[in-house]
Image (cartoon, grey):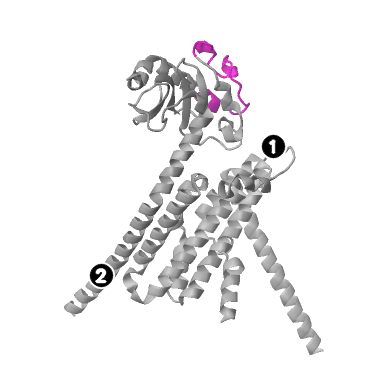
Amino acid sequence: MSNLYKEITINGLWKQNSGVVQLLGLCPTLAVTTSAVNGLSLGFATALVMSAANGSVSPVRQFVPNEIRVPVFILVIAALVTVIDLSINAYAHELHKVLGIFIPLIVVNCIVLARVESFAAKNPTLPSMLDGFMMGSGLMLVLGLLGAIRELLGKGTVLSGLDLVFGPAAHAFMWTSVDYHGFLLAVLPPGAFLGLGSLIALRNWIELRKTASHQSAVTSTQSATSH
Amino acid sequence: MATHIIKHALKTSVAMLAFAFVGTLLLAYVFIATRPPIEASEKEARLALFKQILPEKNYDNDLLSSQVRIAPNALLGNRLPSIANVATFQHKPAGVILEAVAHDGYSGDIKLLIAIRADGSISGVRVLAHKETPGLGDYIDIAHGNWIKLFNDESLQKTPTEKWQVKKDGGQYDYMVGATITPRAVVKAVLKALQYFEMNKQTLFAPSAN
């Protein structure tokens, strides 16, 4: 059983990462990642929505007639997104001003419906919730990393605006490079495409190296046994 | 066969209705539960913004509830009726906070909040919303620079109309090279708001005189 959970975690964070492998949910990935805090916050909201959506669809999956499963899933997702949108507006107002229009857009993020449809509709509640959370966290990592890269190149800071989430005390966590005027392109839309492209390339490179070293290890043991 | 189809259709639509009903209930509950904190934080955010441009010591009325409706006006650039907040001190007019919109920015409208004292001088200006290029035209926003403070204490009396321009056009306002369109639009919008104030101060301050 714990193997299942481990597999779900690895799938969500690395193997099937929605940001750099499945390439689902590109709209927020490209649009929101102008800073690390923006990326991480939206990623976190997505992870929350995904685990809640998976967790609420899974227990009622046998009551959902097959023909209307997509409308029902969308309804559940849209309701949850609105709940989270209202809650962020109520309890983290400053953050809501920054993320504003992107939170309602979580509804149309394909990855949410994709996980509900392909995982929660077929699996028990607990694994479904974990799957949603891990898939969302995988996206959050990509959003955060991409946001940090673009922010660092574009503005010379990392984690600026953290005080919008955690109050003025968090301002101390912001890191600023010395006297750097910023490379504007990184913050503009092209920077999002270039950054995401680089991240995908990096992930593929790591994966290729892993399989290459694995293969060479296999061939070397084979040659060793054959001799 | 036909009854089977009807039965199946009924079952499906009942299920859909049930989900829609539960979803609606949940939304209604959360909407009602989060409304007070949302309203409170919106009010607080607005008041905090007001404080930045019109210090609290200048007025003693409830600024948020002392509102005047303003019809769409070319000088203010609003295409929909907007709200002006009138500040009074000991029942005498102290100032007004106007919303102005500049349509001639580099990309999209620039929404401004302008606080004008009763004597016609500017107490402060802030950008409420803009879509100017990040890192280039966004220095009009207080989060990215102090440029907007150039307007503090300016007035039509102090600065003649022809000086209400960026330096490049022969005026007195600094700008950043490579981003002239943005400050040009803001300077023009502030000037027009002042002109609007001069023409309409009687009406603006009329209710507070009672």
Instruction: Estimate the x, y position of residue A168 in percent, counting from the top left.
Output: 61, 44
Question: Can residue A179 be seen by looking at this rendering?
Answer: yes
Report the predominant secondary structure element of the magenta stretch: loop
Report the residue marked by disc 2.
B14
Instruction: Estimate the x, y position of residue A169 in percent, counting from the top left.
Output: 63, 46
Task: Tell me which amino acid carries mark 2.
Answer: Val
- Outermost residue on the front side: it is B90
Does the magenta portion include A36? Answer: no
Q: Secondary structure at mark 2?
A: helix
**On the picture, is A17 further left or further right than B200?**
right
Tell me the quarter of the image containing the N terminus of chain B: bottom left
**On the picture, is B31 further left or further right than B49?**
left
Residue at horizontal 60 percent and vertical 34 percent from the top: B144
Report the residue marked by disc 1.
A181
Which of discs 1 and 2 lies nearer the camera? The answer is 2
**Label 2: how many residues lie within 10 Å, few (<14), some (14-19) or many (20+)?**
few
Question: Label 1 is found on which chain of the structure?
Answer: A
The residue range painted magenta reads B156-185
**Label 1: how many residues lie within 10 Å, few (<14), some (14-19) or many (20+)?**
few
- Outermost residue on the bottom side: it is A226
- Outermost residue on the right side: it is A227
- State the residue in front, A57 or A151: A57
Residue at horizontal 57 percent and vertical 76 percent from the top: A5
